[in-house]
Each structure stands twice: as C-alpha cells, then as structure tokens.
Image (cartoon, coloured by chain):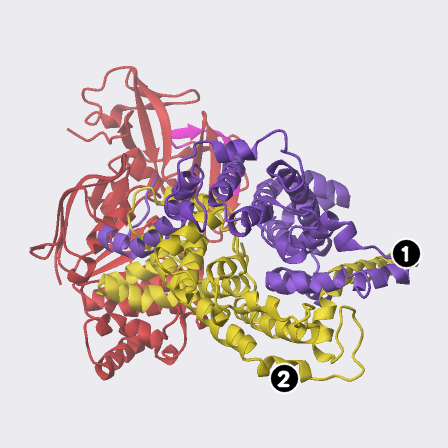
C-alpha cells in the first residue's frame, strides 16, 4: 500500500517550491548547459573573442587530448594522473581508512578521551580552508616546521616537504583534513548496529577481528559505499591544494580543479577552461551513476 | 594474568589515543601559539612573553577589519538567510504537498549539484554573474553560494521535515487552523532546529569559502576574510606572519563557536553531507 | 451535535482501493467504533470524516450539510490522534486552547475555557507544563481536552489508547466512555482492539478490505457474526472454526462426525458433500463427560491457567480448538479428553465464510 498523507495543497506547495527552483535552475542547470556551449568556442575574458566568440568545434577537446603533449607537466593528461593519485591516496586510503580506524577504535567506548580525540578531528575538518592551509604550510616548513622538528627529535633528516615531496604533502594534508567525515559516518553506521548482534557474536565466541569481518562490515556496506563515493567526489573537486602549493612546483600538484582555474582565469582561455570543466562533470556524473547503481543493487539484495 | 592484561589494555588505549590526538593537534599547534608571540615565525615555540599586540595590529588595519567584520559577515549572513528560508519552504513542500515525483526531484537535485560543482563550473558561473552585472558585488557572491548550497540544504531539511509526524499539522488543521496558520503556528516552530542546523551549515560553508569570492570579487574593499588573509605581505613580498596568524585565529573563532553551539544545543547530529 | 452520513464512499490511493463503496449513517449522539485489522480502511474512513483525505467518489454529510469538499476547519470536529500530536513548543494550556485561538477567542476567555476542560479531565495541575514533561496517560487526556474544548459537533478518535500500557488503557477506556455519554456528542472511534470496541461502542462497524462487513450493536455482532472473519475477529480467544464436510445428515471431519439434525433449517438447500465451517466460542465448550452427546475428541495441546479461568487447547483433526473453563483450578485429568457443547451454540458458515441463516 502506497499512500502518503498530504497536508499542503498542491498549489501552495508549488509556490513554496518556486524560489528555490529558480535559484537551482539559474546556478546549477544553466551553468551545466552553458559550459557545454562555451567549451565549443574560443571565448576569452578580454579582447575580441570576449564579445564575439567563435565556434571552434571540438578544437578545445582535441587540444586537451592531444597525445603528443598529453602527459607533459602542466597538460591535461598529467593533471588527470596527479588527480587520480591524489584522490586514491588521500581520500580512499587516507580519509576512509583513517576514519574507519578512528570509528572502530572508539566504538563502544565513552568518556573524555574519545570526546577529545573526535573533537580534534572534527575541528580539523570544520575550520576554514585557508586557515588550514596556513597552518600546514607552517607545519611542513623546511626550517622551522613542526614536522621537521619532530623528525629531528627522533634523529631523522629534515625533509623539504613542499618542494621535494609536494604531491605527498597535499595527500597527507587532505587525508588529515577530511578524516572526520568518514569517522562520523562510520561511527553513526556502527551505532545503528543493534548491540544484540554483537552480543550474539560474543556469546558464540567470535573474536574482535571476526566480529568486524563477519558482522559489522557486511552490515555497514551501504555506509561504506556512500562514504567512498562522497569523499571521492569531494576530493576530486576540491580546490584546497591550490592554497597549499598553488599547483606547483612545476605543476607537480596541479589537480584538475587547479588546472581549470589556471587555464580560465590566468590564461583567460574560457573555451579550454570550459572543456576541462566539462570533462570534470562527466567524471562526476560517472561517479554519481556508479553510486546510484551500487545503492540500487544493495537494496535489491536486501 | 587478567589484571595484567587489563592494565596493558588501558595503557595501550591511552597510548593509541594520544597518538591520534597528536596527529590532529600538531598541525594546528602553531595556529594557537603563534598569534600570541610578537616574534612569530613558522616554527612552534612558546612565546617568551604572551602578547596581544598581534591582535592590536589586526584591529589597526582597516582593510583587515573590514574584510572580516563587514564583508565576510555580509556574505555569510546573507547567504545563510536566503538558503535557510528557501530550503525550508522547498523542503516543506517536497515533504507535505502532493508533488509528483518528489523523491526523484530531491535525489535529482543532489545528483546534479554533485556534478555541477563550483570548481567544474567556475567558468559559466563567472560568465553568468558577469552577464548579470554583478561582478565585484556582495550580491553576486551571495547568489552563487545560495545556488550552490541550496540542493544539499533542501535535502538535509527535507530529511528533517520527513522525520516530523504529520499528525502535528493534521491536528492543527482539524482544530480549525488555515493552511497558512498551521504553517506559521505549528510547522515552523517544530522545524526550527532543522533550520538552525541548515543555517549554521550554510554560514560555515560561506565563511570558509575561498574560490567563489576569489573569482568574483576584484576590489580589496569587498574581499571577505578568506581572500583578504592572502594580502598581508611586506613591500618586499614576504608574508607578515604575526598579522596573518592573529587574523587566522580571529577568522576561525566564529566557526568554532558555532560548532560548540550546535554541539551543545542539538548534539552534533549527523546529516548526510553536513559539509561539502 | 450531528449525524454523520457516508453515501457510496470510495477512496483510492493510486491503484489501491482503501475504502470500497461504503455507506452508513451514524446517529446523532451515537458512539460508533470502526473495528478491523490494519489496512482495512478504518483509519482512512475516519480521516475522510475529518477532511484530511478526500474521497475518490461519493458524498459525506455532517448534520444536513454536505462537507465532501469542505476543508477540515470548516467541519467543526474534534480529533484525538494515536500519537496525541500535542504541539511540543506549546504548554498544555496553549495546546488545549489552540482550537479557540484559531477561532479568534480572546486570550482570557480561551485560557479560562481550557482550564475548565482540563479540570474536568483532572489535568488542571499540568497546564503550564510542556507535553514532553508529562506522562503518556496525561498526554492522552490533554489531547482529548484539546479535541473537546471548542464543543465540536463530532468527535473523532484514531486509536487513542494504543500507545498506553494495559492498565492505563482500561482506565482511559472507562473515562472516555463516561465523557462521551455525559457530553452526548456523536463519536467515531477507530480501533483494532475488539475488546475496546465491545466495551465502548453503541454500534460496531467491522471492516475488512475496505468494506464494512457487519454493522450493529456489539453484543449482536458478537452473538451472530455474519462471516467467519467477524467471528474470528471478535472475542478473545477468538471463535474456534472447524472445516467439515456435510454428508448424509452429519458433519464429517477426519476425527469426528457430528449429527447435523438440529440444523435442518440452516442446511436447507445444502448439497451432500458441501464444505462448511463450524464455529463455536471457547466459552461454550466444556470438558466432555459420558453424558455428552455432542463431543469434539482431541489430544491435549496446552493448558493455560489464567486465574479465574483456564484455557485448554486440544488438537482436533488438523485444527486447534480452545475452551475457556471457568474454574480457578486448572483441570488435571485430561487423558482421552474431548470438548462437549450444546448444539444451540454452533455457528454455521458456508465455504465462502458467509453465515448460513435459517430459512
């Protein structure tokens, strides 16, 4: 039986819905189609082609996928590879695993220790991007940075993080920054497991690892999928590496969002910038569709 | 044997907890200490003398004050009001009115907004605001943030409205209230906690947002703190760390205060994508 | 005060028919219970009276006026919800006074009236509390107060006692019945609890699959259930139903054969070999003695002493048959037991569940 009690008449409902729809149409739907259009032109910010852009067909796309320079530093292909590494290591490995470990470690515990550690993680997650970027550039500084000081304390060699290992730096930075989201999501997933399930496992004599593997992980599968897709999408679209490294040195940390910015707003090539944005959206769409189909399959198996 | 294991377990718990705490706290340590040191540099060292002079320098800098206490506030509060209002109305309609395909609409919105992100769509968003003649205006920034945050806000809010029993409103209708009276007297007060959460979430997002004002604003007089913080350089081009750290701390405080407020008032309830 | 009339009301949700061509008339001042299992359409029926659902077809009248298209606020009704729906942001006094507030009664008068109603329901000491600060039973009374404060023409109750624990439920049942008798307001009461319906109603409408299967005074419905569904739904434990075959003047089953002679009138026109259902209420069974002519033989399945009575269940043929034995000593000697009964207490139903009537 499918019925949902309606309380608001349809007309009032549509009036309530109208203003938000207008905004979303203007700032989500319109840009989506606009970007597709601009990506086929040679539009720029200033000059003749700003007012009268010409239709250039697939030129912008062909340039992006020009195989002779595809993987050279600063080119689209190289940027995609960097982004892939960044997303895989910082989101899927860093954030999700760190979040899962944190959630698992404090699961079924209470007290000020848990509260404090979780609050610290949440603070790292909620304070503004630019502040975190500042804190991290100090933290990773070669001469006075806290990290090198710590390494020195244990007798290690100083590392020039931002210049020598820039990609690793932004990966660690992003994993640290976003771990709280996965931690919260997994904590709430763990919390939704009826305690009796685990007590049953205890009674039949399952160890901690078996409990995690046989009972908990299968029950929170949906949460894991949700977490992975969301953090992948967010990390893929984040602009914050720019705040730490500006994309450098020598384009080594230029993820696609930063590349888009450079092409569109430093070189003022809106056509090419739009083409990159278009490819980003298609990748976003692919993630979203994979997510939806996985969710649907999950529901089917229940 | 058991006692030993228990003690070891406790010790292990504290050691691992401290390790986690250190991982999250160490990168932020500098942010807490440096603002109070007159000789702040990039290293963490306890100031010889705790001083508020860095903060005095911030307040003496009219550009910095204006960015933080005027521009950031206008943009964040403006967006917060718009998003909360529109999301509440839309979510209420999606939850309570017989709109066809309302589930598809809700999911479609979130899907679309996760595809058309600020970074992917920066060019058309810039062009749109340019066409509207709103480049270098607070309104332009507010509109773009509103459009970007609305879908998720509607989704969070709808989740909240859906969790409220319909019998409250039905009871008001049967008691003799009109639809508008029911919405004003009953529905709005009951969804207020949800509005608070969405409002805080919006505020924090705009307050910390960098890319949108970075692209859309030009004149220093309109920059919010997130962009202004990059302008404290000496004439020689080296950053003025003392000023910057104090400013960063001041800029972070509202976010921390709001987090503590929400945590105290409602508990940090977990909404799907509280932060995007 | 007013009559409530349904004329051929049908309500569909998409392709699902929740209420199927229902007509009835509830008299002025009458207390009617809509009784049925979940999904039978009873709550939808109530919500259509309230104006919270629109019928797909048919007309609804309150008093002499057609309210089919009227909004809830134009119907002058009071309703108590299953979850009470007390507004959490208002005090009990503000909750009770809300129907008067929307009717623009001034603040002083409405709070005076709210206090008066609260006093009659013995919750006047709670007026300044919030709903979250009072017990379930008190919340229930407060929601009743809010439903009656503006002296509506009809009271509607949607399972108002189902969230109370067993003891409070009995108490609330008595006071609600008392209140309704005292005020004499037409009341429609939805419940799935047959005891509640029996105890409170002037008339009971038993519903199933969107239709009213029987509508009458509770005892009449109890004594002469029109279908096996009603027979099974009313009474606790419910009526025993035994499938039998009518052949050669007897009711035949695997383990027993009963003389069908006393049922000549009901069986007129029933062919040999027809499948029938025999019904008998647990209170009409006793442990059989040698003197019994009418006996259901069986093996003991369970004995449940309940204090003033005991339930004894035998396995008879493929069915379980339960008897209520009114004695504070549970029976002990049960070997070779059987249930004896008086054929006058037998109910006969056709294979489709309809009662066989005399004539």
Depth check, mark 2 against mark 1: the one in front is 2
Tell me the quadrant of the picture where the N terminus of chain A can be found.
top left
Q: Colour of chain C?
A: red
Residue C245 relative to residue A243: left or right? left
Seen in the picture, residue A34 relative to C49 is either above or below; the reply is: above
As drawn, the label of residue A156 is 1
Figure chain in yellow: B
Rendered residue at 22%/55% (across/down): C50
Distance Cα–Cα, label 2 vs label 1? 39 Å
Q: Nearer the viewer, residue B156 or B186?
A: B156
Label 1: state its secondary structure.
loop
Where does residue C83 sit, x and y in percent of width and height? Answer: 38, 59
Most common secondary structure along the magenta stretch: strand
Rendered residue at 56%/63% (across/down): B268
**Outermost left residue:** C64
Residue C257 relative to residue A148: left or right? left
Q: Nearer the viewer, residue C122 or B1?
A: B1
Rendered residue at 45%/72% (across/down): C133
Q: Colour of chain A?
A: purple
Residue A234 part of the magenta segment: no
Q: Which residues are magenta?
A: C291-303
């Amino acid at each position: 039986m499918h019925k949902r009690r309606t309380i608001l008449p349809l007309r009032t409902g549509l009036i309530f819905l109208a203003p938000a729809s207008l905004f979303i149409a203007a700032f989500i739907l319109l840009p989506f189609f606009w970007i597709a259009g601009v990506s086929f032109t040679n539009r720029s910010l200033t000059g003749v082609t700003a007012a009268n852009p010409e239709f250039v067909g697939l030129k912008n796309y062909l340039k992006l996928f020009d195989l002779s320079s595809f993987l050279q530093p600063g080119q689209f292909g190289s940027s995609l590879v960097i982004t892939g590494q960044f997303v895989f290591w910082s989101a899927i490995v860093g954030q999700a695993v760190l979040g899962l470990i944190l959630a698992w470690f404090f699961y079924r515990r209470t007290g000020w220790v848990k509260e404090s550690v979780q609050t610290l993680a949440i603070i790292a997650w909620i304070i503004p991007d630019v502040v975190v970027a500042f804190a991290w550039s100090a933290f990773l500084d070669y001469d006075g940075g806290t990290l090198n000081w710590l390494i020195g304390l244990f007798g290690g060699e100083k590392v020039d993080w931002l210049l020598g290992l820039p990609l690793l730096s932004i990966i660690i930075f992003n994993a640290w920054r976003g771990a709280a989201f996965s931690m919260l999501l997994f904590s709430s997933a763990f919390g939704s497991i009826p305690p009796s399930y685990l007590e049953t496992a205890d009674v039949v004599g399952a160890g901690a690892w078996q409990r995690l593997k046989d009972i908990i992980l299968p029950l929170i599968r949906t949460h894991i999928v949700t977490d992975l897709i969301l953090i992948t999408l967010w990390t893929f679209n984040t602009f914050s590496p720019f705040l730490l490294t500006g994309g450098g040195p020598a384009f080594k940390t230029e993820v696609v969002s930063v590349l888009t910015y450079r092409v569109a707003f430093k070189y003022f090539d809106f056509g090419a910038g739009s083409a990159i944005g278009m490819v980003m959206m298609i990748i976003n769409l692919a993630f979203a569709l994979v997510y939806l189909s996985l969710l649907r399959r999950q529901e089917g198996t229940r | 044997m058991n006692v030993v294991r228990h003690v070891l377990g406790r010790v292990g718990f504290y050691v691992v907890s401290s390790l986690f705490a250190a991982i999250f706290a160490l990168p932020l340590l500098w942010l807490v200490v440096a603002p109070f040191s007159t000789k702040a540099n990039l290293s963490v060292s306890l100031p010889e003398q705790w001083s508020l002079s860095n903060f005095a320098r911030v307040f003496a800098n009219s550009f910095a004050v204006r960015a933080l206490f005027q521009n950031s506030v206008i943009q964040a509060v403006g967006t917060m009001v718009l998003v909360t209002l529109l999301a509440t109305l839309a979510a209420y309609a999606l939850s309570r009115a017989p709109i066809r395909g309302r589930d598809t609409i809700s999911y479609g919105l979130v899907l679309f907004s996760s595809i058309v992100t600020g970074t992917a769509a920066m060019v058309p968003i810039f062009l749109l605001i340019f066409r509207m003649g709103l480049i270098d205006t607070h309104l332009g920034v507010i509109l773009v943030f509103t459009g970007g945050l609305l879908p998720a806000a509607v989704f969070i809010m709808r989740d909240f409205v859906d969790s409220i029993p319909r019998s409250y409103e039905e009871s008001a209708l049967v008691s003799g209230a009109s639809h508008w009276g029911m919405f004003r007297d009953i529905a709005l007060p009951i969804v207020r906690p949800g509005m608070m959460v969405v409002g805080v979430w919006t505020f924090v997002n705009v307050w910390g947002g960098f890319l949108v004002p970075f692209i859309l604003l030009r004149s220093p007089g309109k920059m919010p703190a997130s962009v202004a913080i990059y302008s404290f350089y000496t004439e020689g081009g080296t950053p003025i760390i003392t000023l910057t750290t104090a400013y960063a701390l001041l800029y972070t405080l509202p976010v921390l205060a709001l987090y503590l407020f929400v945590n105290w008032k409602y508990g940090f309830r977990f909404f799907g994508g509280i932060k995007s | 005060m007013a009559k409530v009339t349904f004329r051929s009301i049908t309500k569909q949700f998409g392709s699902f028919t929740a209420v199927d061509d229902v007509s009835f008339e509830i008299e002025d001042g009458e207390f009617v219970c809509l009784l049925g299992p979940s999904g039978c359409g009873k709550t939808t029926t109530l919500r259509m009276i309230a104006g919270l659902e629109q019928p797909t077809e048919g007309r609804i009248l309150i008093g002499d006026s057609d309210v089919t298209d009227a909004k809830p606020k134009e119907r002058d009704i009071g309703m108590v919800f299953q979850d009470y729906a007390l507004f959490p942001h208002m005090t009990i006094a503000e909750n009770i006074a809300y129907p008067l507030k929307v009717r623009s009664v001034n603040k002083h008068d409405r709070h005076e009236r709210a206090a008066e109603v609260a006093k009659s329901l013995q919750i006047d000491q709670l007026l300044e509390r919030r709903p979250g600060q009072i017990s379930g039973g008190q919340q229930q009374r407060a929601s009743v107060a809010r439903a009656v404060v503006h002296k509506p023409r009809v009271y509607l109750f949607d399972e108002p006692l189902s969230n109370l624990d067993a003891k409070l439920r009995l108490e609330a049942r008595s006071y609600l019945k008392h209140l309704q008798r005292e005020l004499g307001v037409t009341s429609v009461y939805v419940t799935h609890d047959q005891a509640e319906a029996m105890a409170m109603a002037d008339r009971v409408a038993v519903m199933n699959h969107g239709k009213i299967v029987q509508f009458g005074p509770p005892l009449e419905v109890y004594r002469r259930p029109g279908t096996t569904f009603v027979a099974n739904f009313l009474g606790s434990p419910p009526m025993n139903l035994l499938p039998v075959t009518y052949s050669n003047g007897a009711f035949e089953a695997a383990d027993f054969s009963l003389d069908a002679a006393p049922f000549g009138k009901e069986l007129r026109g029933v062919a040999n070999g027809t499948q029938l259902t025999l019904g008998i209420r647990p209170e009409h069974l006793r442990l059989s003695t040698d003197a019994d002519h009418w006996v259901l033989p069986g093996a003991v399945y369970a004995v449940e002493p309940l204090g003033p009575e005991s339930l004894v269940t035998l396995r008879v043929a493929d069915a379980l048959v339960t008897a209520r034995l009114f004695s504070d000593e549970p029976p002990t000697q049960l070997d070779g037991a059987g249930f004896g009964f008086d054929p006058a207490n037998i109910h006969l139903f056709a294979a489709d569940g309809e009662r066989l009537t005399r004539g």
